Each structure stands twice: as structure tokens, then as C-alpha cells.
Image (tube, rainbow, N blue to C red):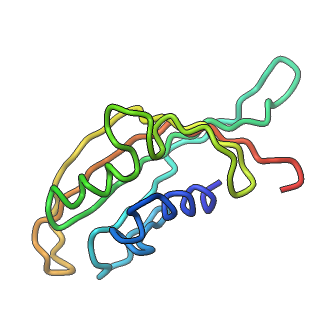
Amino acid sequence: MEEALRAYILALTGMPAAVGTRVDWNLSPQGRPYPSVVLWDISSIEQMNLAAPSGWVRARVQVDSWGTTFKQARDVSHIIAPPGRKAGLNGLRATFGGYRFRIFVIDRDASTDEDKAVGSGVIHRARLDLDVWHSKLSGA
């Protein structure tokens, strides 16, 4: 699921121009330029029905968009899921990368941090929390 979701995000209109290929799971390589995106698998629960596992997994995925300005971080976040409408990942019902996906934005937030390692001073984060339902296609 992770690589399929990463590939889908990288293919969103405007994303290659904004971040290039700087979308990673669970890390942000030191010295990497901004803007960038870091994805976190917060939790994953295999869904059950009365007979057996349903084949669907419900994951909570945190998406951190980082930038040298608040606008830069927010703009990248809005490519991923524009607020107030079904677009990008928000409300997505699609099949790609060998998986069926149902994705919803459940929270948005923003914050700042210090990045002394790169020497860029204050950096900004726009966070999306996603409810990601996924099911592997048979034979994939």
C-alpha cells in the first residue's frame, strides 16, 4: 500500500513541480531541500466480518508537508487534498498500484519547527490526517 499511495501522490497535478520526488515514508533525509512531504503510518487495523478478515485494512496516515514558508507548506498540502471539496486524496475512491483505495481527510493542522541541521531556520508544516481504507487486489 505504501508505495502505491506514494506513487499516486507524486502523480497528482502540480506535485512534481512542487516537490519533485521528495515524498517519503517515515523519514525526512537530513539536508533535503524544501518543500517536501513525509508520510507516517500511524495505525493499521485489519477489518473483520463475522466469518473472517474482510480483505480491507483501515489505516490512519499522517501527511506532513514541509516548507520554508507557511504558504509553501500549505500549498503542497492543498495539492494533496484541497480543503472544502472532493479532490486530490479527499474522498478518493480508486484502484491503483494493485490496491483498491477509499481515502478521506479527517483533520488538518499546521505548525512550525526549527531546522538547525540544514541552517534554514524556521520551517513550516501543514499536516493532514487521512483515513485510508485499502484492499489488495487478488493476483496483485
Q: Where 54 falls versus 8 (above or below)? A: above
Hey, which residue is sitting farthest front in the picture? 13
Q: Where 19 falls versus 44 (above or below)? A: below
Look at 28% across and 68% down and name the residue there: 35
Image quadrant containing the C terminus: bottom right
Look at 11% across and 66% down and name the residue there: 122
Q: Is residue 47 left or right of residue 23?
A: right
Q: Where 47 falls versus 68 (above or below)? A: above
Q: Position of residue 29 (x, y in %)?
A: 38, 76
- Looking at the rendered structure, the number of numbered marks drawn on it comes to 0
Hey, which residue is sitting farthest left in the picture? 121
Q: Is residue 96 left or right of residue 128?
A: right
Image quadrant containing the N terminus: bottom right
Q: Where 87 falls versus 140 (above or below)? A: above
Look at 25% across and 41% down and name the residue there: 109
Rendering quarter of residue 8: bottom right
Q: Position of residue 14 (x, y in %)?
A: 38, 62
Rendering quarter of residue 132: top right
Q: Position of residue 82 (x, y in %)?
A: 34, 43
Q: Position of residue 38 (x, y in %)?
A: 40, 61
Look at 10% across and 72% down and name the residue there: 121
Rendering quarter of residue 106: top left
Q: Is residue 53 left or right of residue 57?
A: right
